[in-house]
Each structure stands twice: as C-alpha cells, then as structure tokens.
Amino acid sequence: MALDPATVRRIATLARIRMDDAEVTTLAGELNTILGWIEQLNEVDISNVDPLTGAAHMALKMREDVVTDGGYPAAVLYNAPDRIGDFFAVPKVVE
C-alpha cells in the first residue's frame, strides 16, 4: 500500500500538522516505509504460535508493607555535596 501526497496531506490535516510540499514528499516516503514493514509482519506465519497470556492473569507476590531507610544510608549519601546526619543538606530556597 502506497500513500499518495493527497492522503499524506489529509493525515497531516487530521493530526493538526502544518506541512509544506517538501515535507509532504518526505513524510510520504517515511510512511510508505513504515507500511512496508507492517506488510512484512503480516506475511509471517503465526498459525502455530500460542498467544501470550500477559501479566493480567498472573498473581503478584505480596510483601509486607514496611517503611525502612533502605539499610545503607552511607552508600546513598556517599556522593552528596553536603549532608546533615543521614540526610541531604540543601540550600534554603524560601526566604
């Protein structure tokens, strides 16, 4: 399937994209390349491929909801330019 310049202009109008004639020609080539890739994908035989189940049918592992400091504040603050105890120190921004 090849897109002609009139179809590309129509798509650009629907997408609210302003284009001049040089851009229409460039975009037509790019869109035709994309459609060519889609046609190649449609040629692949997937008759023996089972559909993917997706993550919606999987049960997630639950863990206890506990607030922690991560257990390694020294490693987290190693490259901090300034710190106070186990916290980042930042300049005051509100007077």
Image: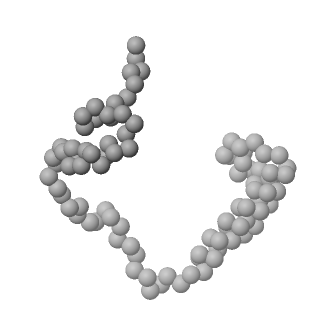
On the image, which quarter does residue 50 sit in? bottom left
Q: Where is residue 76 in the image (x, y as percent from the top left)?
A: 31, 46
So how many labels did they put on this image?
0
Q: Nearer the viewer, residue 45 or 77?
A: 77
Q: In this view, does 66 lie above or below 46?
A: above
Q: Where is residue 72 in the image (x, y as percent from the top left)?
A: 24, 49
Q: In this view, does 69 lie above or below 60?
A: above
Which residue is farthest bottom? Answer: 48
Residue found at x 65% / y 71%:
37
Q: Nearer the viewer, residue 81 or 34?
A: 81
Which image quarter holds the N terminus? bottom right
In this picture, residue 18 sits left or right of residue 15: right
Asked if residue 3 shows in the view, the reply is: no
In this picture, residue 47 sits left or right of residue 25: left
Residue found at x 69% / y 71%:
36
In this picture, residue 15 sits left or right of residue 51: right
Residue found at x 37% / y 29%:
90
Q: Where is residue 82 in the image (x, y as percent from the top left)?
A: 36, 33
Which image quarter holds the C terminus? top left
